[in-house]
Image (cartoon, rainbow, N blue to C red):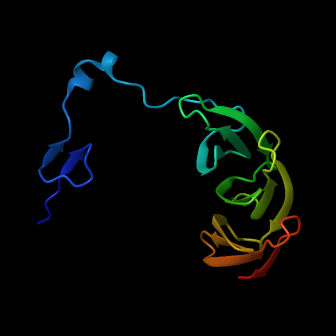
Amino acid sequence: TTTQYLGIGLTLPTEALDVDGNIQNILHPENTPVVGVTLPLTGGSLPSRIVVQGRYGYVLASSTLNVIDLDSPLSPIQVGTAVFDDGADPQNIAIAGNYAFIANHGNATMAVVDISNPTFPLQVATTTFTAGSNPQSIVVNGKYAYVGHYESTYLATVDISNPLAPVQVAT
């Protein structure tokens, strides 16, 4: 048999129910400190991914990339939005230098967004993948972006040495 433990506030519980702390926050919720805030996005809905670089968070939502100033974590401010084509369905994002590379599942593309001005992120290039591909994940290493395609079981290698003209060089 397998013994299962449930931990609250613990990563390695040692008993069937293992609680770190006490229940005062449940008995007196008015005394519970606020540790986060909610920021409604003005671009897109259904946020799916966030990447943080420096003081900015880059949030994918529907067909948008939203730039959030996180300089004050309890008072984040949305400062910019880039809108993608309808049906892009962005799934993942990687940041390298002044560019965000986005894997768009819906239209089988990789979008390149210039983020050098956080208040005005601008899509500057797009690479279209083979029909039937489903870009799902993306990482950048040096002059290459590696894009994993869900359901079509291949990895695309894209040369991004010139972010304004990315070229798929291998699958």
Residue under the point 20% across and 35% down: 21
Residue under the point 60% across and 77% down: 153
Q: Position of residue 160 (x, y in %)?
A: 79, 71
In this image, 72 relative to 36: left or right?
right
Residue under the point 58% across and 33% down: 72
In this image, 19 relative to 160: left or right?
left
Q: Looking at this view, is 55 or 61 the one in front?
A: 55
Q: Position of residue 55 (x, y in %)?
A: 64, 44
Quadrant location of the C terminus in the rendered image: bottom right
Tally of marks: 0
The quadrant holding residue 77 is top right
Q: Is residue 52 above or below residue 153?
A: above
Quadrant location of the N terminus in the rendered image: bottom left
Residue under the point 67% across and 66% down: 134
In this image, 52 relative to 163: left or right?
left
Q: Is residue 69 above or below residue 121?
A: above
Q: Position of residue 162 (x, y in %)?
A: 86, 70
The quadrant holding residue 88 is bottom right
